[in-house]
Amino acid sequence: MSLKPSLNEIQKLAKDKHIENKKYFDKLKKKAPKNLDYVMQELHDAEFKRTDCLKCANCCKTTGPLFTSADIERISKHLKQKPQQFIDQYLRIDEDKDYVLQSVPCTFLDAENYCMIYDVRPKACREFPHTDRKKFQQISDLTLKNVAICPAAYNIVEEMKKKLPL
């Protein structure tokens, strides 16, 4: 099963849809349908039944998650390191004063697109692309970025516009 849209198409498609999507999300923020969370959960579940993230891993290759202090504690313990060792070896502080990876692609992504710390991965990775987030309308800026990274997020937003025309 190949990815639709493909990775070499996704940035162009997302760019072409950006204005349309932004207008849609602006309307969504003003007046979210009552059933939004329910519909998003349905669309998210349906998309991830047919999407194999291992064929893509574009999120791991092109962006880095934010690491919470709980993430740092959990991962450093798993790696048998002190939290500060883990921070020094893998992380940096970004312009928002958050801990992020020193570089992408992610250090913990292997050649087959498997995560080497999958069971203890950061919360941001577990929740990506956040299309099943409650009060989904509150993360529209993040979603606009994610449709250019994640074919599944792109498809979910396209389906969402059909299912919930505003």
Image: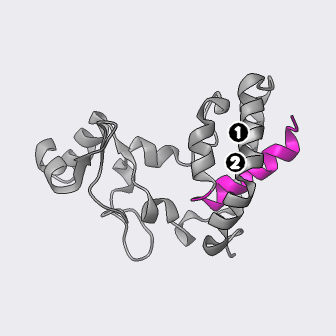
Circle 2 crowding by C-alpha within 10 Å: few under 14, some 14–19, many from 20: some
**On the picture, is 148 further left or further right than 57?**
right
User: Magenta stretch: residue 35 in it?
Assistant: no
Please give the name of the residue rendered at 71% of the width and 63% of the height, measured from the top-left corner.
Answer: 13
**On the picture, is 148 further left or further right than 43?**
left
**Considering only vertical position in the picture, is 51 above or below 42?**
below
Position in image of residue 136 (x %, y %)? 65, 33
**Considering only vertical position in the picture, is 149 above or below 2?**
above
User: Magenta stretch: residue 163 in it?
Assistant: yes
Position in image of residue 79 (x %, y %)? 20, 54
Q: Look at the image and tell me whether residue 166 can be seen.
A: yes
Magenta region, residue range? 148-166
Position in image of residue 54 (x %, y %)? 53, 68
Give amino acid for label 1: Gln
Please give the name of the residue rendered at 77% of the width and 39% of the height, measured from the top-left corner.
Answer: 24
Mark 1 touches mark 2? (CB < 8 Å): yes
Position in image of residue 21 (x %, y %)? 74, 46
- The Cα–Cα distance between marks 1 and 2, rounded to whole angstroms, is 6 Å
